[in-house]
């Protein structure tokens, strides 16, 4: 067990960890504590994936045929973006509209992009 010193925000969540006592970090806590480990090892969200990753994840999720049909019914700019984009950006307006049309929740979109990033 090693003690670290934490800074907390107004809600009590850890916002910083120091190896030694600081004027701004005086609360000592075990470095193996779950909340310290969660703070130190936060996983960055995935904001974009390659076209290859995106389309392989559609295939793996059983969505590629549904998405292909949906895209074919969209304006030409959406069709061109789907066919020729090298990168798919999670928060782009077209992507947001597409996932909304599929009824996906924010968590499902995040999970989709995390899985795609692993391909």
Image (cartoon, helix red, strand yellow):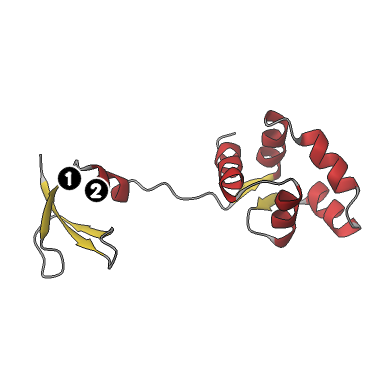
Q: Residue at x 71, y 36 (%)?
A: 58
Residue 38 horizontal/vertical position (percent)? 31, 46
Task: Measure how far apart labels 1 and 2 are at the Cα level.
Answer: 6 Å
Q: Quadrant of the C terminus?
A: top right
| Relative depth, front residue between 30 and 46 | 30
- Would residue 58 be found to the left or right of residue 70 on screen? left
Sort mark 1 into few (<14), some (14-19) or many (20+) by Cα contacts within 10 Å. some
Q: Residue at x 71, y 46 (%)?
A: 103
Question: In the displayed structure, would residue 23 be above or below residue 99?
Answer: below
Q: Which mark is residue 36?
A: 2
Instruction: State which quadrant residue 115 falls in.
Output: top right
Element assignment for label 1: loop
Q: Earlier in the sequence, mark 1 or mark 2?
A: 1
Element assignment for label 2: helix
Residue 104 horizontal/vertical position (percent)? 67, 46
| Relative depth, front residue between 39 and 83 | 39
Q: Residue at x 68, y 51 (%)?
A: 88
Q: Quadrant of the N terminus?
A: top left
Residue 22 horizontal/vertical position (percent)? 11, 66
Question: In the displayed structure, would residue 24 be above or below residue 76?
Answer: below
Q: Which residue is mark 1?
A: 31
- Would residue 90 be found to the left or right of residue 63 on screen? left
- Would residue 22 be found to the left or right of residue 37 on screen? left
- Would residue 20 be found to the left or right of residue 88 on screen? left
Q: How many marks?
A: 2
Q: Which mark is residue 41?
A: none
Q: Residue at x 80, y 41 (%)?
A: 67
Sort mark 2 into few (<14), some (14-19) or many (20+) by Cα contacts within 10 Å. many
Residue 12 horizontal/vertical position (percent)? 25, 61
Tell me if label 1 and label 2 are in contact, CB under 8 Å: yes
């Amino acid at each position: 067990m090693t003690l670290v010193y934490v800074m907390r925000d107004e809600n009590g969540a850890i916002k910083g960890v120091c190896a030694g006592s600081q004027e701004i970090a005086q609360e000592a806590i075990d470095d193996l504590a779950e909340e310290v480990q969660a703070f130190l090892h936060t996983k960055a969200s995935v904001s974009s994936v390659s076209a290859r990753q995106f389309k392989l994840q559609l295939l793996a999720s059983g969505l590629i045929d549904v998405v292909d049909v949906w895209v074919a019914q969209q304006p030409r700019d959406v069709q061109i973006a789907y066919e020729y984009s090298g990168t798919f950006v999670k928060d782009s307006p077209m992507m947001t509209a597409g996932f909304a049309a599929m009824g996906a929740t924010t968590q499902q979109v995040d999970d989709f992009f995390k899985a795609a990033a692993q391909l």
